Amino acid sequence: DTGVSQDPRHKITKRGQNVTFRCDPISEHNRLYWYRQTLGQGPEFLTYFQNEAQLEKSRLLSDRFSAERPKGSFSTLEIQRTEQGDSAMYLCASSPRGGIADTQYFGPGTRLTVL
Amino acid sequence: AQKITQTQPGMFVQEKEAVTLDCTYDTSDQSYGLFWYKQPSSGEMIFLIYQGSYDEQNATEGRYSLNFQKARKSANLVISASQLGDSAMYFCAMRIDTGANSKLTFGKGITLSVRP
Protein backbone atom coordinates (compact mmCIF):
# COMPACT_ATOMS: atom_id res chain seq x y z
CA ASP A 1 0.00 0.00 0.00
CA THR A 2 1.65 3.24 -1.15
CA GLY A 3 1.49 6.17 1.22
CA VAL A 4 1.25 9.87 0.47
CA SER A 5 4.18 11.08 -1.61
CA GLN A 6 5.46 14.61 -2.11
CA ASP A 7 7.88 16.06 -4.59
CA PRO A 8 10.39 17.60 -4.25
CA ARG A 9 11.52 16.82 -0.74
CA HIS A 10 13.67 19.92 -0.59
CA LYS A 11 13.55 23.17 -2.54
CA ILE A 12 15.90 26.12 -2.28
CA THR A 13 14.90 29.22 -4.21
CA LYS A 14 15.67 32.89 -4.38
CA ARG A 15 13.22 35.51 -3.20
CA GLY A 16 10.83 36.49 -5.94
CA GLN A 17 10.90 33.16 -7.77
CA ASN A 18 7.88 30.91 -8.22
CA VAL A 19 7.84 27.37 -6.87
CA THR A 20 5.46 24.45 -7.30
CA PHE A 21 5.06 21.39 -5.11
CA ARG A 22 3.28 18.17 -5.92
CA CYS A 23 1.39 15.77 -3.69
CA ASP A 24 0.13 12.31 -4.63
CA PRO A 25 -2.41 11.06 -2.08
CA ILE A 26 -3.15 7.49 -1.11
CA SER A 27 -5.16 6.05 -3.95
CA GLU A 28 -8.93 6.26 -3.50
CA HIS A 29 -8.64 8.91 -0.79
CA ASN A 30 -10.99 11.64 -1.86
CA ARG A 31 -9.85 14.27 0.61
CA LEU A 32 -6.51 16.03 0.32
CA TYR A 33 -5.08 18.65 2.70
CA TRP A 34 -2.16 21.07 2.68
CA TYR A 35 -0.51 22.29 5.87
CA ARG A 36 2.47 24.51 6.58
CA GLN A 37 4.86 23.94 9.47
CA THR A 38 7.44 26.45 10.63
CA LEU A 39 10.28 25.68 13.00
CA GLY A 40 9.13 24.90 16.53
CA GLN A 41 5.44 24.94 15.64
CA GLY A 42 2.77 22.44 14.81
CA PRO A 43 1.35 22.22 11.29
CA GLU A 44 -1.12 24.93 10.30
CA PHE A 45 -3.96 24.26 7.91
CA LEU A 46 -3.78 25.90 4.49
CA THR A 47 -6.46 24.36 2.30
CA TYR A 48 -8.26 21.15 1.45
CA PHE A 49 -9.97 19.41 -1.43
CA GLN A 50 -12.74 16.92 -1.68
CA ASN A 51 -12.12 15.27 -5.00
CA GLU A 52 -11.37 18.17 -7.34
CA ALA A 53 -13.29 20.80 -5.38
CA GLN A 54 -11.35 23.16 -3.12
CA LEU A 55 -13.68 23.46 -0.13
CA GLU A 56 -11.79 25.64 2.30
CA LYS A 57 -8.85 28.02 2.31
CA SER A 58 -7.12 29.43 5.38
CA ARG A 59 -6.40 33.10 5.79
CA LEU A 60 -2.76 32.01 5.74
CA LEU A 61 -3.18 31.32 2.04
CA SER A 62 -2.41 34.70 0.56
CA ASP A 63 -3.05 35.64 -3.07
CA ARG A 64 0.43 34.43 -3.92
CA PHE A 65 -0.58 30.86 -3.08
CA SER A 66 -2.70 28.70 -5.33
CA ALA A 67 -3.60 25.05 -5.09
CA GLU A 68 -5.22 22.73 -7.58
CA ARG A 69 -6.34 19.14 -7.73
CA PRO A 70 -7.27 18.40 -11.31
CA LYS A 71 -9.32 15.25 -11.79
CA GLY A 72 -9.35 14.66 -8.06
CA SER A 73 -6.03 12.83 -8.00
CA PHE A 74 -2.69 14.55 -7.34
CA SER A 75 -2.51 18.14 -6.13
CA THR A 76 -0.12 21.02 -6.72
CA LEU A 77 0.64 23.97 -4.49
CA GLU A 78 2.21 26.97 -6.18
CA ILE A 79 3.78 29.95 -4.46
CA GLN A 80 4.39 32.98 -6.63
CA ARG A 81 6.94 35.69 -5.88
CA THR A 82 8.32 33.82 -2.89
CA GLU A 83 9.30 35.69 0.26
CA GLN A 84 11.66 34.68 3.04
CA GLY A 85 8.67 34.24 5.31
CA ASP A 86 7.48 31.41 3.06
CA SER A 87 10.37 29.24 4.26
CA ALA A 88 8.73 26.27 5.95
CA MET A 89 7.87 22.61 5.63
CA TYR A 90 4.81 22.08 3.43
CA LEU A 91 2.92 18.95 4.36
CA CYS A 92 0.27 17.15 2.38
CA ALA A 93 -2.22 14.69 3.86
CA SER A 94 -5.06 12.59 2.54
CA SER A 95 -8.04 10.83 4.10
CA PRO A 96 -10.73 8.51 2.80
CA ARG A 97 -13.99 10.22 3.59
CA GLY A 98 -14.03 13.01 6.16
CA GLY A 99 -15.87 12.98 9.47
CA ILE A 100 -14.56 13.35 12.97
CA ALA A 101 -12.85 9.96 13.14
CA ASP A 102 -11.38 10.14 9.65
CA THR A 103 -7.61 9.86 9.96
CA GLN A 104 -5.38 12.06 7.87
CA TYR A 105 -2.24 10.37 6.59
CA PHE A 106 0.69 12.64 5.92
CA GLY A 107 3.42 12.65 3.33
CA PRO A 108 7.11 13.32 4.05
CA GLY A 109 6.77 17.03 3.33
CA THR A 110 8.57 19.51 1.09
CA ARG A 111 11.04 21.74 2.90
CA LEU A 112 11.21 25.15 1.25
CA THR A 113 14.09 27.56 1.86
CA VAL A 114 13.80 31.04 0.39
CA LEU A 115 17.10 32.91 0.24
CA ALA B 1 -12.28 28.55 17.80
CA GLN B 2 -10.54 25.43 18.98
CA LYS B 3 -7.12 25.41 20.63
CA ILE B 4 -4.60 22.75 21.61
CA THR B 5 -2.07 23.38 24.36
CA GLN B 6 1.12 21.41 24.84
CA THR B 7 3.35 23.15 27.37
CA GLN B 8 5.79 20.50 28.56
CA PRO B 9 9.42 21.27 27.91
CA GLY B 10 11.54 18.58 26.33
CA MET B 11 10.79 15.25 27.97
CA PHE B 12 13.29 12.55 28.80
CA VAL B 13 12.54 8.92 29.61
CA GLN B 14 14.66 5.86 30.25
CA GLU B 15 14.32 3.02 27.77
CA LYS B 16 11.62 0.51 28.78
CA GLU B 17 9.90 2.95 31.12
CA ALA B 18 6.51 4.58 30.56
CA VAL B 19 6.03 8.27 29.80
CA THR B 20 3.03 10.60 29.69
CA LEU B 21 2.80 13.50 27.25
CA ASP B 22 0.27 16.16 28.20
CA CYS B 23 -2.35 17.76 25.98
CA THR B 24 -5.19 20.08 26.91
CA TYR B 25 -7.74 21.40 24.48
CA ASP B 26 -10.37 24.07 24.31
CA THR B 27 -13.57 23.95 22.33
CA SER B 28 -17.20 24.79 22.82
CA ASP B 29 -18.30 21.98 20.51
CA GLN B 30 -19.64 18.75 21.97
CA SER B 31 -18.57 16.55 19.09
CA TYR B 32 -14.88 16.42 18.27
CA GLY B 33 -11.98 14.07 17.68
CA LEU B 34 -8.52 14.07 19.25
CA PHE B 35 -5.43 12.69 17.53
CA TRP B 36 -1.79 12.15 18.38
CA TYR B 37 0.93 12.17 15.75
CA LYS B 38 4.64 11.41 15.95
CA GLN B 39 7.16 13.37 13.88
CA PRO B 40 10.67 11.92 13.72
CA SER B 41 13.55 14.03 12.50
CA SER B 42 12.79 12.87 8.94
CA GLY B 43 9.72 15.12 9.05
CA GLU B 44 6.84 12.79 8.27
CA MET B 45 3.81 12.95 10.57
CA ILE B 46 2.89 9.44 11.72
CA PHE B 47 -0.61 8.82 13.09
CA LEU B 48 -0.60 7.10 16.48
CA ILE B 49 -4.03 7.12 18.10
CA TYR B 50 -7.54 8.63 17.96
CA GLN B 51 -10.15 9.39 20.62
CA GLY B 52 -13.69 10.56 19.90
CA SER B 53 -15.42 12.90 22.31
CA TYR B 54 -18.29 10.43 22.78
CA ASP B 55 -16.08 7.39 23.26
CA GLU B 56 -16.60 6.04 26.76
CA GLN B 57 -13.38 4.09 26.91
CA ASN B 58 -9.86 5.37 26.54
CA ALA B 59 -8.30 4.52 23.19
CA THR B 60 -5.39 2.09 23.02
CA GLU B 61 -3.13 1.13 20.13
CA GLY B 62 -0.33 -1.24 21.04
CA ARG B 63 2.08 0.60 23.36
CA TYR B 64 0.08 3.83 23.03
CA SER B 65 -2.92 4.73 25.13
CA LEU B 66 -4.83 7.94 25.50
CA ASN B 67 -5.86 9.12 28.95
CA PHE B 68 -9.02 11.06 28.06
CA GLN B 69 -10.52 13.25 30.78
CA LYS B 70 -13.39 15.10 29.14
CA ALA B 71 -14.35 17.29 32.10
CA ARG B 72 -10.77 18.52 32.40
CA LYS B 73 -10.42 18.78 28.60
CA SER B 74 -7.25 16.77 28.59
CA ALA B 75 -6.07 14.01 26.26
CA ASN B 76 -2.70 12.80 27.46
CA LEU B 77 -0.70 10.24 25.50
CA VAL B 78 0.86 7.39 27.47
CA ILE B 79 3.69 5.43 25.87
CA SER B 80 4.51 2.24 27.69
CA ALA B 81 7.85 0.43 27.51
CA SER B 82 9.65 3.26 25.69
CA GLN B 83 12.01 2.36 22.88
CA LEU B 84 14.92 4.32 21.41
CA GLY B 85 12.90 4.74 18.23
CA ASP B 86 10.25 6.67 20.16
CA SER B 87 12.57 9.70 20.27
CA ALA B 88 10.69 12.30 18.21
CA MET B 89 8.32 15.26 18.34
CA TYR B 90 4.77 14.41 19.41
CA PHE B 91 1.78 16.50 18.38
CA CYS B 92 -1.72 16.52 19.75
CA ALA B 93 -4.43 17.61 17.31
CA MET B 94 -8.17 18.14 17.27
CA ARG B 95 -10.86 18.13 14.64
CA ILE B 96 -14.35 19.51 14.89
CA ASP B 97 -16.59 18.28 12.13
CA THR B 98 -18.84 21.13 11.14
CA GLY B 99 -20.06 20.35 7.67
CA ALA B 100 -17.30 21.01 5.20
CA ASN B 101 -14.71 21.98 7.80
CA SER B 102 -12.42 19.02 8.29
CA LYS B 103 -9.08 20.53 9.23
CA LEU B 104 -6.87 19.45 12.11
CA THR B 105 -5.74 22.01 14.67
CA PHE B 106 -2.35 21.11 16.15
CA GLY B 107 -0.50 22.02 19.32
CA LYS B 108 3.12 23.14 19.30
CA GLY B 109 4.39 19.66 20.08
CA ILE B 110 6.58 18.02 22.71
CA THR B 111 10.08 16.67 22.16
CA LEU B 112 10.65 13.23 23.64
CA SER B 113 14.11 11.78 24.07
CA VAL B 114 14.54 8.16 25.11
CA ARG B 115 17.76 7.37 26.94
CA PRO B 116 19.40 3.93 26.66
Image (spheres, coloured by chain):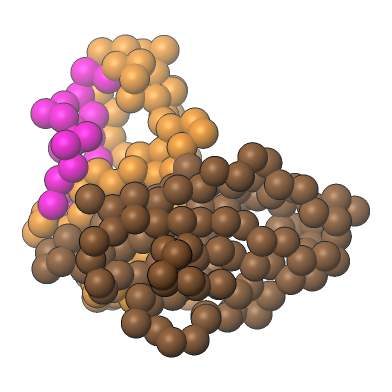
Write the residue at 62% across / 57% down.
B21
Q: Quadrant of residue A88?
A: top left
Please state, as top left, top right, bottom left or bottom right, where the C terminus of chain A lies in the image. Answer: top left
A37 relative position to A20: left or right = right
Which hue is chain A drawn in? orange
Which hue is chain B drawn in? brown
Q: Quadrant of residue A84?
A: top left
Residue B43 in the image, given as x and y percentages of width and height: 54, 45
Furthest residue in direction bottom, as rendered: B56
Q: B76 or B88: nearer the eye? A: B76
Residue A51 shows in this picture:
no
Furthest residue in direction front, as rendered: B71
B18 relative position to B46: left or right = right
A1 relative position to A68: left or right = right
Write the residue at 65% across / 80% down.
B62
What segment is highlighted magenta in the picture? A56-82
Residue B86 in the image, given as x and y percentages of width and height: 71, 58
Q: Is residue A76 magenta?
A: yes
Q: Quadrant of residue B27?
A: bottom left
Residue B2 shows in this picture:
yes
